[in-house]
Amino acid sequence: MRKKVTGERIVAAIIDSIIVGIIVAVFSFIAALITGYGSEIANLFTNAFAGTETSTTEFMTKDQINFTVASTIIEFAIGWIFFVHIPYKMNGQTLGKKLMRIRAINEFGENPSYKQHIIRAIQNWSAYLSLPIVFFLLVNVILGSVLAVIAGLITTPLVIVSIILIIAREDGKGLHDLIASTNVVLATVNVEDEFIKKTTRMADWAEVDYVQKDSNDSDEKEDDWDKY
């Protein structure tokens, strides 16, 4: 039985989340300065410390909407690069997986296809939904906000279910692994050698079964001759 790497996966996910979070925060800060939303945030904190109330109408400005759209695009782009493109180029490894010496594989033990990496990147599922939804903010703030909440209500339970499956299942597969037909193993595991060993064992079992069956047939024939 192949060793489960649940602990390594969790640590790798934490490392990846920290790295991506820092990168997204830096670019989002730049986006806030460009869209002018940074000054609105500063005013919000100033009013809060001064005890001045800020209404939702005042806060939900065009600058905030532009910033939300920009930050969502940034999150999607960085998530795509980090959780899809990099592992595709690095033999199924994100930076976190590389540090923990684990990698994603497909059902044949190879680096998953680009499509499989897109599907299994559960960290991006929220961004996949948020990217088209966020543009509704440009049309209707309330509609866009409601759709964003719905997207969160959809993706969050899926992530929780995936974590539970990773811990509970004997093969350590999460929901995203089951959908994408992938798994995560130690980077040192040679899946091809495992396949050869399993095939050899199956051949040995088949040979033993054949010999036993042939022996039984011979005994039956001898019994038939004894009758005559």
Image (cartoon, grey):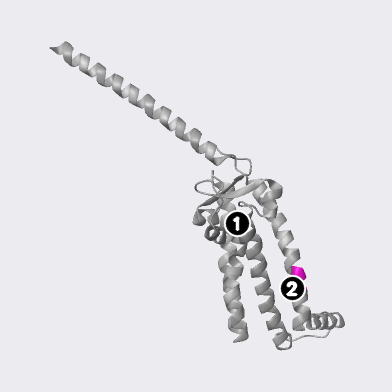
**Left or right: residue 199 compared with residue 88:** left
Residue at 25% x, 21% y is 217
Point out residue 208 in the picture as x, y percentages from the top left corner.
Answer: 38, 24
Q: Which residue is mark 2?
A: 28
* Quadrant location, the N terminus: top right
The mark lying in front, picked from 2 and 1, is 1
Q: Residue furthest front?
A: 89
* Quadrant location, the C terminus: top left
Instruction: Residue 62: say if magenta.
Output: no
Q: Secondary structure at mark 1?
A: helix
Mark 2 vs 1, N-terminal side: 2
Task: Tell me which secondary structure the magenta stretch mostly adopts.
Answer: helix
With respect to residue 215, does 12 lie above or below? Answer: below
Point out residue 51 in the picture as x, y percentages from the top left corner.
Answer: 84, 83
Q: Quadrant of residue 121?
A: bottom right
Question: Tag 2: residue type?
Answer: Ser
Label 1 neighbour load within 10 Å: few <14, some 14-19, many 20+: many
Q: Is residue 69 visible?
A: yes
Point out residue 169 in the picture as x, y percentages from the top left corner.
Answer: 54, 46
Instruction: Residue 28: say if magenta.
Output: yes
Residue at 82% x, 80% y is 42
Q: Residue furthest left?
A: 228
Point out residue 106 in the picture as x, y percentages from the top left corner.
Answer: 52, 50
Q: Which residue is mark 1?
A: 88
Question: Tag 1: residue type?
Answer: Tyr
Question: Label 2 vs label 1: CA separation?
Answer: 26 Å
Q: How many marks?
A: 2
Point out the stretch of residues depicted in magenta. Answer: 25-29
